[in-house]
Amino acid sequence: MNSLDWFAQLLLAGIFVFSGLSKIFAIQRRVKTTAHTSLSCTCSGMPCNVVLAIALVELTGALALIVPFNLWQPGILPLLGAAGLALLTLCACIYHLRRHESAAPIVALFLLTLFVIIGRWPQ
């Protein structure tokens, strides 16, 4: 694994940590302003529980990319984290395309996750 792989992995982790934390803080702001009367996030058109689950998956995948912890084999946890984030970005791309929105940034994230998966693939 060379330095370009590490850079891509850290960039991907940073993007998903920022995205997950911003979703969690947006939910907290939304719940405080509505005074617990409505738990639907109108900014994304999804319930707050679904947005919270997506944020937790993003944070878990990002932490799996950067935490140096070996479960079974060396490097399997970052590979699983990148695979989970790739699946998440693929689902997000389909969601945005169905809503007739631009999916270009999500496709770029998907390609970055594929780059990390290929870079972390055991030889």
Image: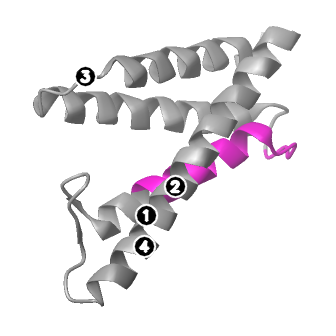
**What kind of residue is marked 1?**
Ala
Q: Which mark sits nearer the N-terminus, 2 or 3?
A: 2
Coordinates of residue 84 in the picture (x, y in percent): 51, 38
- Which residue position holds label 2? 22
Q: Quick one: 64 or 95, which is closer to the camera?
A: 95
- Asked if marks 1 and 4 touch (Cβ < 8 Å), the reply is yes
Which numbered disc covers residue 29? 4
Q: Residues within 10 Å of mark 1 (few under 14, many from 20)?
A: some
- Which residue position holds label 3? 102
Indicate whether 49 appears above or below 56. Answer: below
Is 76 included in the stretch rendered in magenta? no
- Which residue position holds label 1? 26
Q: For the residues marked 1 and 2, what is the alpha-carbon distance in whole angstroms?
A: 6 Å
**What kind of residue is marked 3?**
Ser
Q: For the residues marked 3 and 1, what is the alpha-carbon distance in whole angstroms?
A: 22 Å
Q: For the residues marked 1 and 4, what is the alpha-carbon distance in whole angstroms?
A: 5 Å
The residue range painted magenta reads: 54-71
Indicate whether 47 appears above or below 112. Answer: below
Q: For the residues marked 3 and 4, what is the alpha-carbon distance in whole angstroms?
A: 26 Å
Q: For the residues marked 2 and 3, what is the alpha-carbon distance in whole angstroms?
A: 20 Å
SS assignment for the magenta stretch, majority: helix
Q: Residue 2 falls in which quadrant of the image?
A: top right
Q: Residue at x 80, y 31 (%)?
A: 75
Coordinates of residue 65 in the picture (x, y in percent): 72, 37
